Amino acid sequence: MKTMKTMLSVLLAVLLLAACGVLAMAECAHEYDPTYYPPTCNDRGYTEYVCSLCGDRIQEGFVNATGHMYGEWQDLSQPTCTATGLQKRVCRVCQGTETRTIGMLDHADADGDGTCDTCDFVFEKEENNELSPYEWLKLFFRNLVAWFRAIFA
Ligand SMILES: [Zn+2]
Ligand SMILES: [Zn+2]
Ligand SMILES: [Zn+2]
């Protein structure tokens, strides 16, 4: 009889605790205050609702980032036949900059003197590119010697 009473009171206590837990977890009546965060160049925009009672946060109504609103490309340096050029442009909204390189120019020989008109580059004559059989053989043996040296060094 005594154990029955103890068991009952334990059960009651457990039920009471459970009831308290349910009450504590009961739905908040949620009073949300909306704050609008507009999109920026890099980030999405959205509206955030924060409950003033329980602090619950919901974000919704996402809109895509706007992307940068770049102005015109400006020359920082002009490309030459020995160096690349550089350009930059600035975002009108966030002042973020973007740069790009401009490829080198080809050597030019308008006056046909065999050297570049703007730098000291000497154009190779076509016939020099083709080795005579004798030169080819010389080069072949030179490479062979270098190859043997590399192996037996
Ligand atoms: Zn709430
Ligand atoms: Zn921007
Ligand atoms: Zn040149």
Image (cartoon, helix red, strand yellow):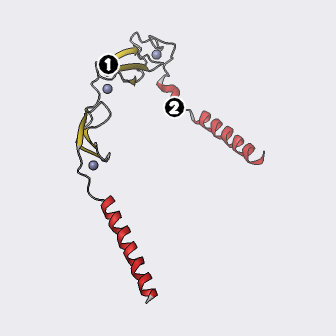
Q: Quadrant of residue 42?
A: top left
Question: What residue is rendered at 31% in x and 64% in y?
Answer: 22
121 to 138, vertically: above or below: above
Residue type for callout 2: Glu
Q: Is residue 131 left or right of residue 47?
A: right
**CB atoms at circles 1 and 2 under 8 Å apart?**
no
Q: Residue furthest front?
A: 2
- Disc 1 beta carbon < 8 A from ligand 2? no
16 to 152, vertically: above or below: below
Question: What residue is rendered at 31% in x and 22% in y?
Answer: 91
Q: CA distance from mark 1 to mark 2?
A: 45 Å
Q: Residue 15, position in %: x, y? A: 35, 73
Q: Residues within 10 Å of mark 2 (few under 14, many from 20)?
A: few
Q: Dot 2: what SS?
A: loop
Q: Residue 44, position in %: x, y? A: 28, 37
Question: What residue is rendered at 47% in x and 19% in y?
Answer: 83
Report the residue marked by disc 1.
Answer: 73
Q: Which mark is residue 142?
A: none
Q: Quadrant of residue 67?
A: top left
115 to 17, vertically: above or below: above
Pick whichever, 123 or 133, lies toward us. Answer: 123
Report the residue marked by disc 2.
Answer: 130
